[in-house]
Image (cartoon, helix red, strand yellow):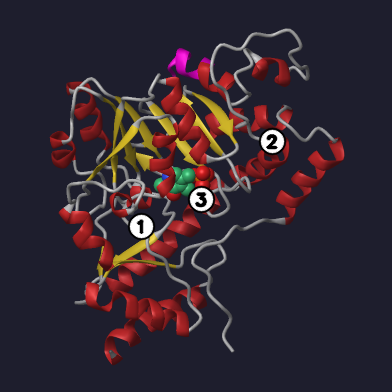
């Protein structure tokens, strides 16, 4: 029996485990020195002048980014429909309304022509998603935002370690949010971070993750706690723990190797499927991204059968994503034709650090066999 090939997974080394054990031994498990170090390391590795604030999830980072911009009930935020429901939940958690927008067929990035038609006097921000790690469309998003006086939140959950315009994601832009959940490019177990150079957003975000207790981050990093404090805003229990940060620091130290392994998996899929009549790859900037997921497009009538065929051969695959505007909570009165045409065609193939060349051959052969036989 061949072993099961997973779609995605965490990879935890003995060094990562030792780093986590050291925190457990220290018996300072909450937010403290390791979180401070992780944030500093993030800034250094990305080569950014922005400040990083760590959270217990990427969703929390997105949620707090919006709150720190003063976004709430009555406000609207433009967001592509083809994203993890986390993007939508982060917006609706503030009381604002996510306005689902269509996507570009080649990149599955937000379609700004469609977004243009959805502007109202209540539109406050645009949340652009770096779908499958690509963000070539961001300069267009910033021009659009400037013209329409919107703030920009980059949902960079897929793109940690990727490069745009010669710089790592997190160097340029308004507010950038990463996820470090179990299957992202680097993992903290669960975790996320927000990066910005907006001092007001930073101060609010730091307090917000610690129940709104003013300057509590500074106290915790000095190994103290705030006993006399004020709270002016709604806060949440959203900070990262030392345990999660220690795992993340170990992963960060290997970032270059992680990126090159992921990139070579994507390159091999690209080369294999290049001239296949039924399989289309996305037109992404594969030379500069750290691929989180590898997505192909196949004829809609065959997608589910291909997914089942792979499953029969012990190969997991995924669908990123079911369009959010078709979910009950976010259902729109309008249709988004490109997303609706494309989502039945997309399939995500295994991409993770423990996918061996032999495993990948099995995946590629299985996809080819399917189209030969069926
Ligand atoms: C993973 C992800 C998030 C949320 O991150 P969590 O850390 O899982 O909360 C947000 N947006 C996208 C596109 C994601 O893939």
What is the crowding at mark 3: few (fewer than 14 residues within 10 Å), some, or many (at least 20)? Answer: many
Residue 142: x and y, percent? 25, 28
Q: Are marks 2 and 3 in contact (CB under 8 Å)?
A: no
Q: Name the residue under label 3.
A: 185
Residue 314 coordinates in the image, percent (x, y) = 51, 81
Q: Which of marks 2 and 3 is in front?
A: 2
Res. 321 mark: 1
**Residue plotted at (60% across, 30% down):** 39
Q: Pick the residue in front: 25 or 234.
A: 234
User: Residue at the bottom extreme?
Assistant: 373
Q: What stretch is highlighted in magenta?
A: 197-203
Quadrant location of the C terminus?
A: bottom left
Q: How many marks?
A: 3
Q: In this view, does 147 lie above or below 240?
A: above
Q: Which residue matches tag 2?
A: 241
Q: In this view, does 215 lie to the left or right of 202?
A: right
Q: Distance between the residues labelled 1 and 3?
A: 18 Å
Does residue 228 sit above or below 2 in this rendering?
Answer: above
Q: Within 10 angstroms of label 2, few (less than 14), some, or many (20 or more) residues?
A: many
Label 1 sits on a secondary structure element that is: loop
């Amino acid at each position: 029996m061949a072993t099961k090939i997973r779609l995605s997974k965490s990879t935890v080394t003995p060094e990562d485990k030792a780093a986590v054990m050291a925190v457990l031994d220290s018996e300072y498990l909450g937010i403290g020195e390791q979180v401070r170090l992780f944030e500093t390391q993030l800034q250094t590795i990305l080569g950014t002048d922005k400040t990083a604030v760590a959270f217990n999830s990427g969703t929390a980072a997105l949620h707090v980014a919006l709150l720190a911009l003063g976004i709430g009930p009555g406000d609207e935020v433009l967001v592509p429909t083809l994203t993890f429901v986390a993007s939508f939940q982060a917006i609706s958690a503030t009381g604002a309304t996510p306005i689902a927008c269509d996507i570009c067929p080649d990149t599955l990035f937000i379609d700004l022509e469609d977004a243009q038609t959805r502007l109202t006097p209540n539109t406050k921000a645009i949340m652009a998603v770096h779908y499958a790690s690509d963000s070539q469309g961001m300069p267009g998003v910033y021009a659009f935002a400037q013209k329409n006086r919107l703030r920009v939140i980059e949902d960079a959950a897929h793109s940690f370690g990727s490069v745009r315009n010669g710089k790592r994601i997190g160097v340029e832009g308004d507010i950038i949010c990463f996820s470090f959940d179990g299957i992202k490019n680097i993992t903290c177990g669960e975790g996320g971070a927000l990066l910005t150079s907006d001092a007001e957003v930073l101060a609010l975000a730091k307090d917000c993750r610690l129940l709104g207790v003013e300057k509590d981050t500074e106290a915790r990093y000095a190994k103290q706690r705030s006993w006399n404090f004020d709270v002016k805003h709604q806060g949440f229990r959203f900070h990262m723990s030392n345990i999660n940060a220690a795992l993340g620091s170990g992963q960060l130290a290997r970032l270059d190797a992680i990126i090159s392994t992921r990139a070579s998996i994507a390159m091999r899929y690209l080369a294999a499927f290049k001239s296949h009549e039924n399989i289309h790859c996305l037109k992404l900037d594969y030379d500069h991204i750290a691929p989180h997921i590898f997505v192909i497009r196949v004829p809609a009538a065959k997608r589910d059968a291909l997914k089942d065929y792979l499953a029969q051969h012990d190969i997991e695959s995924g669908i990123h994503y079911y369009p959010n505007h078709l979910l009950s909570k976010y259902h729109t009165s309008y249709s988004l034709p490109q997303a609706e045409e494309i989502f039945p065609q997309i399939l995500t193939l295994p991409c993770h650090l423990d996918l061996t060349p032999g495993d990948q051959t099995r995946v590629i052969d299985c996809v080819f066999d399917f189209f030969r036989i069926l």
